[in-house]
Amino acid sequence: MGALAHYLEAEGIPTTQISLIREHTEIIRPPRALWVPFELGRPLGIPGDAAFQGRVLRAALELLESQEGPVLEDFPEDAPQGKAGLEETAQAWACPVSFSAAPEKAGDEGELLPALRREIMELRPWYDLSLERRKRTSVAYFPPEAASQFFGSVLLGEAHHIPENLASPAVALRLAAQDLKAFYFESVTARPGFATPGASEFNRWFWQQTAAGRLLKSVRRICADSQDQEMRDAAVRFLIPLDQA
């Protein structure tokens, strides 16, 4: 986004942005940027705190008053849930849904698809509750059942069926993984009385304790040996976080 801002400014369109990685912003030097000390993926802080998020947005928009740049300012507040809070939440958080044990070994891959479908069925009521309460979802291209079907075709070496508006199976691979992960996150954060997990805690749970996480690891292993360069790159570079790969 920082690089794009230079092109927009050259056409006379003022820009401002929020930065989560200060070092990158210092190199790209966009016209105006607000660095925030929050978790990756949470540029406005924690979910559900509209007042705090509003302060972040106002601070970013106020940078538009600067006539010359580059301007890089630091947001003066930590998120209400700072580092210590994140650690406490990570220790206290427990998923409100208990799944049957997912297959542990690569040789058990034949059981991963049925296990994934069972998890989706168990999470679906909580996802529907989340959608009803929040009136929005990050699941954009692949509902969980479609994601399961797509990853099943990859796992079994069958033809891929992807939405017509997606350029290639490699693009579908990335988006299906994002949508499946979003479905799990929105589901497990919908149950009343359960704390919202930090990103690191959710990732540990998703990648280590769910059939979905283990299936994606199996898909990555398969696609890493693909003859399709684009599929191979998408799997190796984008499918699994480095600390889980």
Image (spheres, rainbow, N blue to C red):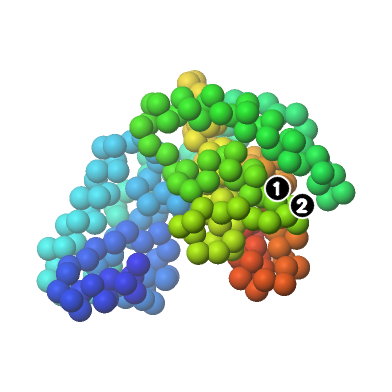
* Quarter containing the N terminus: bottom left
List x then y, in percent, for residue 166.
49, 59
Identify the residue at image location x=78%, y=33%: 101
Identify the residue at image location x=34%, y=74%: 3
Nearer the observer, 128 or 71: 128
Residue furthest to the top in view is 193
Disc 2 secondary structure class: helix
List x then y, in percent, for residue 26.
36, 73
Q: Is residue 84 visible?
A: no
Quarter assignment of residue 91: top right
Instruction: Give the total of numbered labels.
Output: 2
Identify the residue at image location x=18%, y=76%: 11
Nearer the observer, 161 or 173: 161
Q: Which residue is under mark 2?
A: 156
Q: Which residue is under mark 1?
A: 152
Quarter assignment of residue 119: top right
Nearer the observer, 110 or 239: 110
Residue furthest to the right in view is 107
- Contact? badges 1 and 2 (CB < 8 Å): yes
Amino acid type of the residue tagged 2 in the rendering: Leu
**Left or right relative to 179: residue 64:** left
User: From mark 1 to mark 2, how far is it between C-alphas?
Assistant: 6 Å
**Left or right relative to 17: residue 45:** right
Q: Is 72 located above or below residue 44 in the figure? A: below
Disc 1 secondary structure class: helix
Q: Is 168 located above or below residue 48 in the figure? A: below
Q: Is 174 located above or below residue 181 in the figure? A: below
